Image: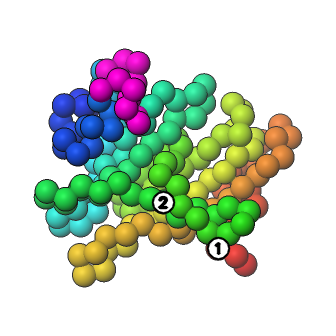
């Protein structure tokens, strides 16, 4: 479901967006009306809130995630691969959710035409009511060479082959 009004967020999340100067605040307090935030049901009692966080750049919008279950609200850290090895990040860029495959995709553009950057995919798992996101795929292309190659074809860094 779309989240178009910040006032509908749980208090524990809203504090990250209000007041001005908060971690995810916007210069326009009505920013959510553009329909970029959403909540996805990932188990019987749990929703994943995916919300734009702060002002985006010219071609990259950061998002933060929260696990919300009844009165429980917790920020989600996403697993990513770095040059040094596995680590986590509190945000993802230019996200997309596929409810059928239960996959969250983030595409960070290294520059506006999108010929370089990173593509990460996380899958939702639900084992005995315990919901988690695991890194299913990570691709990176550092060379901004102007070649029109789909990010799905960029070099795979995770899982290792």
Badge 1: residue crowd in 10 Å (few <14, some 14–19, many ≥20): few
Q: In the drawing, what numbered circle is on residue 131?
A: none
- Residue 7 in which image quadrant: top left
In the foreground, 18 or 61: 18
- Return the x and y of residue 103 as percentages of the image width and height: 44, 60
The span shown in magenta is: 19-29
Q: Residue at x 72, y 34 (%)?
A: 111
Percent x, y of residue 96: 46, 47
Residue at the (35%, 54%) spot, across then down? 75
Q: Which mark is residue 78?
A: 2
Q: How many marks?
A: 2
- Label 1: state its secondary structure: loop
95 shown above or below 159: above
Query: Residue 22 in magenta?
Result: yes
CA neighbours of label 2 inside 10 A, class few (<14), some (14 to 19), many (20+): some
Q: Is residue 28 left or right of residue 47?
A: right
Q: Residue 159 got which mark?
A: 1
């Amino acid at each position: 479901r779309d989240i178009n009004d910040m006032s509908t967020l749980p208090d524990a999340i809203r504090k990250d967006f209000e007041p001005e100067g908060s971690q995810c605040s916007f210069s326009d307090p009505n920013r959510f009306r553009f329909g970029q935030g959403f909540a996805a049901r990932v188990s019987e009692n749990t929703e994943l809130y995916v919300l734009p966080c702060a002002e985006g750049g010219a071609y990259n919008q950061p998002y933060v995630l929260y696990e919300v279950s009844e009165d429980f609200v917790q920020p989600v850290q996403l697993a990513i691969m770095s040059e040094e090895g596995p680590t986590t990040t509190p945000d993802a860029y230019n996200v997309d959710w596929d409810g059928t495959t239960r996959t969250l995709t983030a595409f960070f553009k290294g520059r506006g035409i999108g010929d370089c950057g990173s593509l990460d995919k996380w899958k939702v798992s639900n084992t005995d009511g315990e919901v988690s996101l695991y890194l299913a795929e990570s691709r990176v292309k550092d060379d901004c060479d102007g070649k029109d190659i789909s990010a799905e074809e960029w070099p795979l860094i995770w899982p290792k082959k």
